[in-house]
Amino acid sequence: MKRLLLLPLVACLVALLADEPVDKLNGAFRQTRYKYGAMTKWGTRDSVTVIKVFRDGYWLTAFYDDKRQGRYDEKSPGIRSFNGACGGTYALKGGKYVEKVTFYSWDSTAVGNTFAFDYKVSPNQYEQYGVMTSDKYKDFPINEVAERISSPEPLKHPGLEGVWFMQEGVWGSSRFGEGQYKGMQVVKIFTYPMVVYAYYNPITRQFNGAGGARYQFDGKTLTETNEFWSWQENGARKGKVETFRITAKDGQYVQEGWSGDLREVWAKAPGSGGIAVKN
């Protein structure tokens, strides 16, 4: 009899701890509360914007609009700075959110490390609780609560939703794979209403930069309203609206803009979902 009673309990436990599909977390979230390190009380995010974006097993976090004491740019009133970004891949295993770090602007020794967090996700909120360890951050508690970022306007075309890696890039006289971009990898994540991207060297662990925007796509034109752009740390680019021509075929898309000075070719990451654009 005891064995018969235990069987349903074991089955429930196995189901609870089974791996879950990574798209369960798909979305963009803005942090509202945090408790890091030795903090005993929750802090609120009223002086810096922190976002975390998930899509199909990839994640990116960025700190920007930073007006914390000592970081505000007094020479540019009303303008705040970019603080940093990190990202990588994730899985949902054994009831845990497990993330691997691919780039980390604050501490390159964190790159390659894997951390497991307790987590909760709902239509409106994401929470994670756990500890990270690197040469700089030893057994460092990280507890975060974030609200989902939404838009009153629906996405017009889902063709760019997903994760993409740059194959080719030309920006005026600069080229992807040459000069400062030699050895770089570039990831771009679309999870409406946010698009975020990062440049990093997976071998040297060098972080080059990151950017993010609110976006809309109608099947031919990508419109980005900038949120942050690390290459102008004072935030002067924030709010700038840019449009790009998009053409796509067979799991790739081409992005063109900047009056002909920008041309990028992107390929869909393995396992990333979304609906192909048809031109």
Image (cartoon, grey):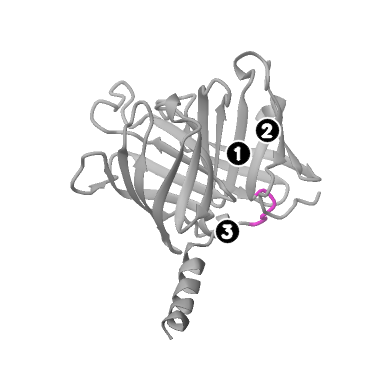
Check whether the beta carbons of the residues at disc 2 and disc 1 lie within 8 A of each other: yes
Residue occupied by mark 2:
166
Q: Is residue 226 among the parts visible in the rendering?
A: no
Dot 2: what SS? strand
Q: Quadrant of residue 69?
A: top left
Per the rendering, the mark at residue 21 is: 3
Q: Earlier in the sequence, mark 3 or mark 1?
A: 3
Q: Would you say residue 130 sits in the magenta stretch?
A: no
Asked whether 25 or 37 is in front, the reply is: 37
Q: Main secondary structure of the magenta part?
A: loop
Q: Position of residue 205 (x, y in %)?
A: 52, 24
Q: SS class of the residue under badge 3?
A: loop
Q: Would you identify the image quadrant in which residue 270 lies?
A: top right
Which of the two discs, 2 and 1, labels the residue nearer the N terminus? 2
Q: Provide residue 80's location: percent of width, then percent of height.
A: 35, 31
In this picture, residue 83 sits left or right of residue 177: left
Mark 3 to mark 2 CA distance (whole Å):
25 Å
Which residue of the protein is positioned furthest toward the left in this rendering? 40
Q: Amino acid at mark 2?
A: Met
Count of numbered circles on the image: 3
Label 2 – label 1 distance at C-alpha:
8 Å
- From which residue to which does the magenta span run? 156-160
* 127 or 47, nearer to the observer: 127
Residue 9 lies, with reference to residue 194, above or below; the image says below
User: Which residue of the protein is positioned furthest toward the bottom in this rendering?
Assistant: 1
Residue placed at 29% from the left, 33% from the top? 67
Could you give the CA–CA distance between mark 3 and mark 1, rounded to whole angstroms? 21 Å
State left or right for residue 8 relative to residue 256. Answer: left
Q: Mark 3: give few (<14), some (14-19) or many (20+) Cα within 10 Å.
A: few
> Which corner quadrant holds the N terminus?
bottom left
Contact? badges 3 and 2 (CB < 8 Å) = no
Q: Which residue is mark 1?
A: 188
